[in-house]
Image (tube, grey):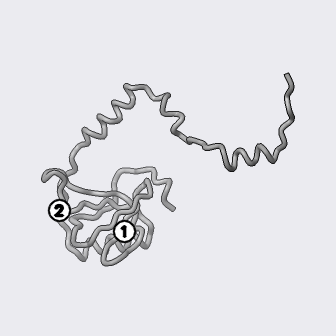
Amino acid sequence: MIIKRVDESVIEQFFKNDYHDRGMLKWGGFFLSDHTSAIKKMKHDKIPEKWLPEQTLEKNSQTLKQAWLHKQVVHVQLKLLHDGETLSSLTGQVAGFHDQKIIFSNVEDQLTAVSLEEIRNVHRPKVSVDWRNFN
């Protein structure tokens, strides 16, 4: 058996052009089926959120302004309903403003645009959440 010595430039080119790292996908096989089904059930059985008192436009805008200036996390309850029953809400930071809409960024860095008239209540969450993605 003859083993050829491989030049480092060949290895470098392989990792630059040919090798594709699947990241965390390769770990998916290590999860037990009980674990994945429990996660799905937990997402499905989410406890409905309580209706909070509707705040004035001025109160909501003042709270959002302070959250934006101080990069604070806020929980926003919307006037919109899902399936006619459960409240729509989002938790995140105010990322900015665009076309009369407020842009929110959540933990996964997903952006959501909401007009001020759609907001029912804004407050700082009382539970401590790990917001490592935020500066």
Amino acid type of disc 1? Ile
**Quarter the N terminus occupies:** top right
Q: Residue at x 51, y 62 (%)?
A: 135
Q: Is residue 90 left or right of residue 70?
A: left
Q: Which quarter of the figure has residue 94?
A: bottom left
Who comes first in sequence, dot 2 or dot 1?
A: 2
Mark 1 Cα-neighbour bin, 10 Å: few <14, some 14–19, many ≥20: some
Q: Is residue 73 left or right of residue 24?
A: left
> Marks 2 and 1, how far apart in space?
23 Å
Against 48, is 75 above or below?
below
Furthest-left residue in this view: 84
Residue 56 in percent (x, y) is at 20, 73
Q: Which residue is mark 2?
A: 53
| 8 or 101: nearer the viewer | 8
Label 1: element kind: strand
Q: Residue at x 33, y 67 (%)?
A: 113
| 58 or 103: nearer the viewer | 103
Amino acid type of disc 2? Pro
Q: Which quarter of the figure has residue 54?
A: bottom left
Q: Nearer the viewer, mark 2 or mark 1?
A: 1
Against 130, is 93 above or below?
below
Mark 2 Cα-neighbour bin, 10 Å: few <14, some 14–19, many ≥20: few
